Amino acid sequence: MFARKLRVEYETEGQLHACPLKWLDNFSMRNFTNASVFDDTLPVADGMLEIGTHVPLEELRRAMEDWFRRKSYLTKDATLVLTLI
């Protein structure tokens, strides 16, 4: 089910940082988008997320970035970067 592995980082001031497992877990536990497509996400470590084949990457990135901003994890100038590995 979790066939793809992602590196999840945020960029601020020109540097990439791994998203803490706490952030990823918070999003995956219930991201409050009510979009079942994100149910196939599994945080495994800081900056590491496994996802199902039907999870759309750009939609996931936008939803995570929005959620992280609402939780005040990301500043306004930071951006989220998802990389398939």
Image (tube, rainbow, N blue to C red):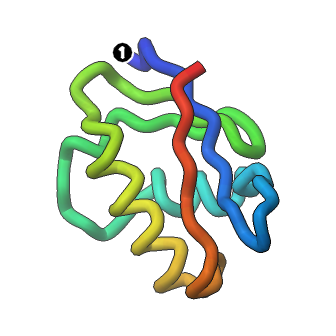
Numbered-mark total? 1
| Residue at 66% from the left image edge and 36% from the top image edge | 48
Q: Is residue 27 left or right of residue 49?
A: left
Residue 39 sits in which quadrant?
top left
Q: Is residue 39 left or right of residue 66?
A: left
Q: Is residue 57 left or right of residue 36?
A: right
**46 over 31 or under it: above or below:** above
**81 over 11 or under it: above or below:** above
Q: Quick one: 74 or 29, which is closer to the camera?
A: 74
Instruction: Please state the horizontal and vertical placement of residue 37, each as a whole percent of the image.
Output: 21, 42
| Residue at 76% from the left image edge and 50% from the top image edge | 18
> SS for tag 1?
loop
**73 over 26 or under it: above or below:** below
- What residue sits right under mark 1 in the picture? 1
Q: Quick one: 76 or 66, which is closer to the camera?
A: 76
Instruction: Please state the horizontal and vertical placement of residue 75, each as a whole percent of the image.
Output: 64, 84
Residue 78 sits in which quadrant?
bottom right
Instruction: Give the crowd class for mark 1: few <14, some 14-19, many >=20 residues within 10 Å.
Output: few
Q: Is residue 66 left or right of residue 48?
A: left
Instruction: Please state the horizontal and vertical placement of residue 17, each as a whole percent of the image.
Output: 79, 55
Instruction: Tell me the quarter of the image containing the C terminus.
Output: top right
Residue 72 sits in which quadrant?
bottom right
| Residue at 25% from the left image edge and 66% from the top image edge | 33
Q: Quick one: 65 or 11, which is closer to the camera?
A: 11
**53 over 45 or under it: above or below:** above
Instruction: Tell me the quarter of the image containing the N terminus.
Output: top left
